Image (spheres, rainbow, N blue to C red):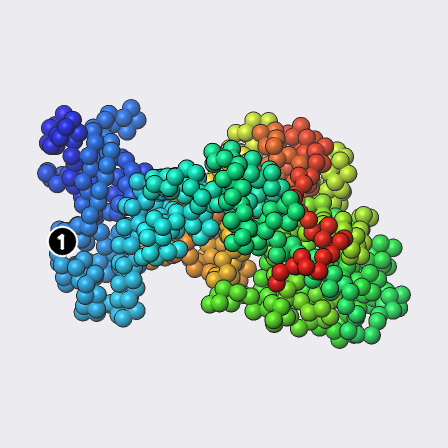
Amino acid sequence: MGQKSQKETIGGEVVLNGSVEQISFRNEESGYVVCSVQPSDRAGGTVTVVGNCAAIWVGEELTATGNWVNDSRFGLQFKADTMVCVAPTSVEGVRRFLSGGLIRGIGKVNADKIVAKFGSDTLHVIEHAPLRLLEVEGVGRKRCGMIRDSWRRLKGVRDVMIFLQSHGVGMGQATRIYRAYGDQAIAIVKNNPYRLCRDVFGFGFITADAIAMKLGIAKDAPERAREGLLHHLQAMQDEGHCFCEESALLLSAQGFLDISVEKLAEALSALVEQRRLVRDGQRIYLRELYDAECNVARRLLAIAACPLPFRGIDADRALAWAEAKMRLVLAGAQRRAIAAGVGNKASVITGGPGVGKTTIIRALVEIFGVRRLNILLSAPTGRAAKRMAEATGREAVTIHRLLKYLPQKRAFTHDENNPIDADVLIVDESSMIDIVLMDQLLRALPDKITLILVGDTDQLPSVGPGNVLRDIISSGAIPCTRLDTIFRQDTRGMIVRNAHHINNGEEMEGGGSDFFFIETQEPDRIVSRVCDLVTSRIPSKFHIPPQDIQVLTPMRRNQLGADNLNVVLQNAINPVGPSLRRGLTVFRRGDRVMQMRNNYDKEVFNGDVGFVRDIDAEEETLRVDFDGKSVEYGRGELDELVLAYASTVHKSQGSEYPAVVMVIATQHFKLLQRNLLYTAVTRGRKLVCIVGTHKAAAIATRNNEVRSRQTALAERLSTPSEGAATI
């Protein structure tokens, strides 16, 4: 009662004033915080304050209104209904505020020096006369500029946070909004909150719509109808579809927008007139996807129809020469694939693991190489390109690096106006290429090029929209060779054999030394066994270190999802060390991390995996090594990274690991499909351990209903239309 008696009571509520001493917990998405506050009306002893605050940092002065509660777990707390913070005014408050690492360029040492020089005027100097910081020993022009820019950004973020908090937007999202729009953030959001869905990573329609409602936009407003239709098509794109049937689009949008079909039809027509959408018969496309699909069909057919720019290759003589050079005997299907590759301008080679795709690529490189042709090798991911290079002894690059992205222009160097200079391009792991990336690639290729696509259509389809490789094959427009005989002899063979068993809908075999199934029922036991395998059993028995072991699971959420497994594995493998926190995630030096979206400025792409090599706690930055490329992330960019000790199977596409531990249980029921299990097993190079239930594995093996994607590429390749494409 003593604490409560010291507080002023207004209308049944208590007002608490004080200085923020420590922030124990902060949810950057919701804005919920738990902090220790030193009350201003008495000395000694902090109190715990909990509640939502748009912007709060150590050292600031807090005014909170609320009530005292006695929490059963944490004791007496001040539960705030409102929390407002302002910059500190006392010398000690300013020192602690600057020491918190909030402003880049000011750590504890520099904070002491700056406050010693300017005292209570410190924040005024930083804001209005930042060049005076040069008077402080150790502060040069570079650091002075860093401090000035960081202070301006801090004030801008605070204004955005305060404005957005009343609309349900948390600190993490507000930071991303400010990063996207800068000082114009509030004006842009007020003018059109739906822009957030398109411009800000991780921002959904539901939140933007809630802001729009609070800003007074009517439920049946034309702009809401238009944005709702765009949102639905974007959601379908995220699920892999290229278009939506018009009737299905209108009915679905009516359901979640509560707007009449008539008004939605008007909005749809307006979007088509604005060229943001395309109506192709009964199909409705986002313009980018329509243009991409039409252009992929047009460019593939154009390349295939163009005559060879070099003297034709005698396939029989070339095959005999390649066999002698490589000291092997090629099988019939391999010979047909090579003959198709050297005899056609465009061709496809498909098949599962161990069927000789790499051998064929090596033979093609040898044959084209002896003709002194300019050969390029590429793949969608860095790891796939690296494997290609190791197999052929030639340089291989990712498609993004092949096209040479220019960050300053936000465009690729190579396109239809500046095509790649090459005679032959061989692309591996082509099943991973979505329709947009294939469009960008084909735009950059000259008609003269010989294009060979290699991939496994039985794997999961691309993360992005389309089903490109499968559609190309099913169209029959491009010669395709399917390989189905297992040749790989470099392991005991159970990984490859079981991959083919899965693909044929057959029960997996045991008894090998590279493939194990550990029957485990309870989720808690599955988690503990996975942890034991990664940290102890596999390293000790197979001499494969934890950093070379990848845990795969069907989903991100729940106890057996990647998010929880990452926390467990991080605590077991890398529990201490320099770190940065974003929300509930802690990044430590040595952590394996994954990039979650394409960042062309940094030249890192969705699915790239690296290791945290350095953390600067004072500057709040970390550096990640992606296969030799060092990339820096600021605190506001950490939402692009996730821990990657465990990953979803989808995100593992194109990668191969020395050892894979796969989690599979019936709680993954909705995702248990043959191509998912097949993809997971084929990621392992030396060892695969499956932890879970045979029942779940059997469900996945039997379920061969590949979820169809709404695409029309196969149709466009079969019945090309001259007027279809827009460049």
Indicate the position of residue 78 as horizontal and vertical percent values: 22, 32
Image: 316 above or below 637: below
Q: x, y (%) of residue 511?
A: 74, 36
Q: What residue do we see at 81% from left, 48% from top?
A: 484
In the image, is 266 to the left or to the right of 456?
left
Say if residue 140 shows up in the picture.
yes
Q: 35 left or right of 507?
A: left
Q: Quadrant of residue 669?
A: top right
Q: Is residue 177 left or right of residue 312?
A: left
- Horizontally, is 326 left or right of 559 in the view? right
Q: Which residue is identified by label 1?
A: 91
Q: How many marks?
A: 1
Do we see residue 353 in this rendering?
no
Q: Which residue is drawn at 60% across and 67% down?
A: 415
Q: Nearer the viewer, residue 131 or 721?
A: 721
Viewport quadrant of the C terminus: bottom right
Q: Which residue is drawn at 41% across and 43% down?
A: 208
Q: Say if 635 sits above or below 696 in the image.
A: below
